Amino acid sequence: IVRFRGHVEFDTLVALLAEFDALVLSSVPVAGSNWVETQATVMQEAMVMGTVVVASDIGGVRESLPTALHPYLYAPGSVQELRDRLIALGASDRRALHQLSTLARDFVLTHYDICAINERLLRHLGSVAA
């Protein structure tokens, strides 16, 4: 079932993300513009709630996802590829979906935790200054 919710308040969004099997991030290049998606924070918000991300393979999106979710990337604007990715995800059994959601959550906690990022930065700066 696909639901288009429109605008929702943050607290509602957090609850909804925890219920979803997947979040679709469908970014496409804008004609006449050099803008591309670099990193959508909503992907990290979804993954930390255990929601699998299906997304356009554009800009920095690939680098913002764990490798296990790369098979769910599709060419920007390709309706057929998006359809295929959603069908593949929908055909996954609950156990496989749970494994993907756990990998996604762990990826965010490892790569996007501000305390961990700051600790790595300080270690790096300390090694450079030494």
Image: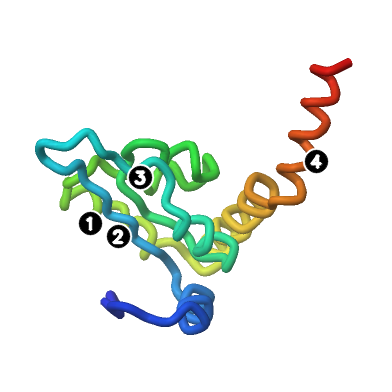
Residue bearing the label numbered 1:
83
Q: Residue at x 55, y 56 (%)?
A: 100
Q: Residue 31's image quarter?
A: top left
Residue bearing the label numbered 3:
73
Q: Are marks 2 and 1 in contact (CB under 8 Å)?
A: yes
Q: CA distance from mark 3 to mark 4?
A: 31 Å
Residue type pointed to by label 1:
Arg
Q: Nearer the viewer, mark 4 or mark 2?
A: 4
Disc on the earlier residue, 1 or 4: 1
Q: Residue at x 26, y 39 (%)?
A: 35
Disc on the earlier residue, 3 or 4: 3
Q: Residue at x 78, y 26 (%)?
A: 124
Q: Residue at x 75, y 42 (%)?
A: 118
Q: Nearer the viewer, mark 1 or mark 4?
A: 4
Q: CA distance from mark 1 to mark 3?
A: 11 Å
| Crowd around label 4: few <14 · some 14–19 · many ≥20 (10 Å) | few
Q: Are marks 4 and 2 in contact (CB under 8 Å)?
A: no
